[in-house]
Each structure stands twice: as structure tokens, then as C-alpha cells.
Image: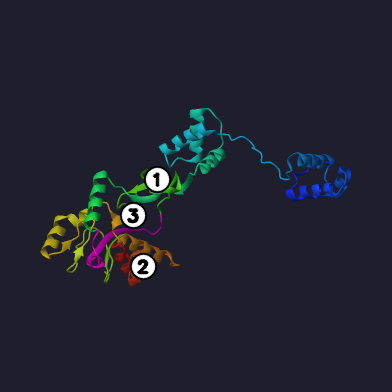
Amino acid sequence: MAKTKELSTFERGRVIGFHDAGDSERTISRKTGYGKTTIHNIITKYHKTGALTVASRSGRPKKLNERDKRHLKVVLTQNRRISAEKMQKDFIESTGKEVSKSTVRRTLYEMGYHSRTALRKPLISEPNRKIRLSWARERRFWTINDWKKVVWSDESRFTLFQSDKKIHVWRLPKESHDVNCLVPTIKHGGGGVMIWGCFSWYGLDPLVRIDEQFEEENGEYFFQQDNTPIHTSLRTRTFMEEVAITQLPWAGQSPDFNPIKHMWDELERYIRARTNSPKNLGELESLLQECWLQIQREVYQKLVESMNR
């Protein structure tokens, strides 16, 4: 009888059980339905090694050796956004070794690399890094009462349809915030409705649609703004001096310092949750105003509290 598949440890144990009971190989073959050659091999191995399990096999040799893996890593780290198809082509051209895209992907997975959506972070220069660090150190001892005095402001653009294309990069799990694995962003640009908003511990101000210029005003607290041209124009600076508004010093290109960015995310979640999407920019602006005022007080108060952590 021909062997059709490898026997399990339990099945091999049955054979040895019949053998220990005094059955012949022919009788065991008839009782179990296994081939006589298979029965003989199991009993012979058992007498030699005392083992019933099947020894692990090396399997098919891997297509890429350690040197190939190192070369593949070099190709990947030179361009984190490279596709598996392009990586395969570059690898073949540089090594002369034929490999498939599946082999390339499987090898990268074994090395710990996976294609992930790149995080979008502000484009920060080295001088600006130092300014940001200095800004944080100067306020490391601020209490929650200090942060309650800040009026946070920012502009954000909302579009009728989400158009930002996701960019994927090859990276290790620990590399999500590495510079080479990020997509740098620069504020503004694109179409849609640009709105300005502000909030503090004590509440929200209505959103303001920005067409060209606008004026800012606040109470007796620190006013935070991001140093964009509309905030630093002569007209704006003159107004702020006249009404004695105290500004919070700010490091440029640092939206991640500003808790209002989470308010924009919250606002977008409110909008996306609506079953009827706005059909034009006028409807979008009205919906933004409506959803903005629906954000609960505990949401923005928790954001202010987070500045003290």
C-alpha cells in the first residue's frame, strides 16, 4: 500500500503499540491500513532512537542569503517610499539575482519591515528644533492655572472631499517617528474653506471664515498665534498693541504644540459623522459653525490640562 501522507505522532504510537503487543508488521499493516514499508520504518527508527516524532527538516533553501538581505536593506533605507516592484527591479539590476516581488516582501517581513502609512509632521529645521526645545523648557514648570490663561488660536482648511493621498513607507515598528519615515507638511494650500478659531479653558469662540485679512481680539489673557503673515502684519500688530493684548511667545512651524489641532480633529469627526454631506462651500461653512459649538466643554478642558503633563 502506497504512503499518502506522513503519519502523526499518535498514529506512529499505534503502530508501536501493536508491535509491543507482539503483532507482526504484516498484521499491523492490515489493522491500521498503513503500508508495510511505513510500518517497518517506524519500528526500525523506534528501536534505534526511541523516538516517535518526525525530525524537523530544513525545507527549501531560502532564495536570499544574509548578504542579499543587507543589500535589500540598503535599497530600502535609501528610499522608504519605494514600492515592492521597484525594489525588486533595483535589487535584480544591482545583484543579478532573479527574485519575485513575493520573495522581496516576505524577506522584508522576516526582517521586521512592513509598509505603513507615513505620519504627517511639520517640516522642522534644525534652528527651529532648538527654538521649540527652548520654548518647552521655559514653560516646564507652568501649572494648570497658567495654561488656563492661554487663548489658543489657529487656522485650518476644510474641504468638501478628503483629497490627501496616504503615503506608505517601509519601516520597523520602532521607526514610526524617524525623520526618513515621516511626510513633512507645510501649513496652508489647497482649496476649500479656511477658518480661524480659538478656545481656552473657559469656552469656544465662534469660527471665522478667512478670505483675506481679519482682526484678532481677546480678553486679559495670553493670546497664542502661530506667526503666520496675517498675524504679523503691521495692521494686526498695531491693533494688538493698541488694545494691550499679551501674546504667548511661539516657535514657528509648531502646530503639534498647539492643543487646538486636536479640536480640528474633533470638528472633522463631527462632520464626517453626518449622514448628509455638504454640497457646496456655503453648506460646509454652516456645518462647521454648527458642529464647532457642539463640542463638549470637557473635551477642550482636557486638552488644556494635557499641557501640564
* Among the two numbered marks 2 and 3 on one chain, the one whose residue lies closer to the N terminus: 3
Is residue 163 or residue 8 the one in the foreground?
8
* Left or right of residue 231: residue 284: right
Q: Residue 53 at what x, y percent from top left?
A: 71, 45
Spatial CA distance of label 2 from label 3 is 17 Å
Residue hosting label 2: 287
- In this view, the residue farthest toward the top is 96
> Quick check: can you spot residue 278?
no
Q: Residue at x 15, y 64 (%)?
A: 245
Per the image, label 3 sits on a secondary structure element best described as loop
Q: Which mark is residue 181?
A: 1
Amino acid type, mark 3: Gly
Q: Name above or below for residue 117 compared with residue 74.
A: below
Q: Tell me which segment is drawn in magenta.
A: 140-162
- Choose the circle earlier in sequence order: 3 or 1: 1
Image quadrant in which the N terminus is located: top right
Is 58 on the left or on the right of 224, as rendered? right
SS state under label 1 = helix
According to the picture, the residue beneath numbered tag 3 turns out to be 191
- Is 97 placed left or right of 264 in the picture? right
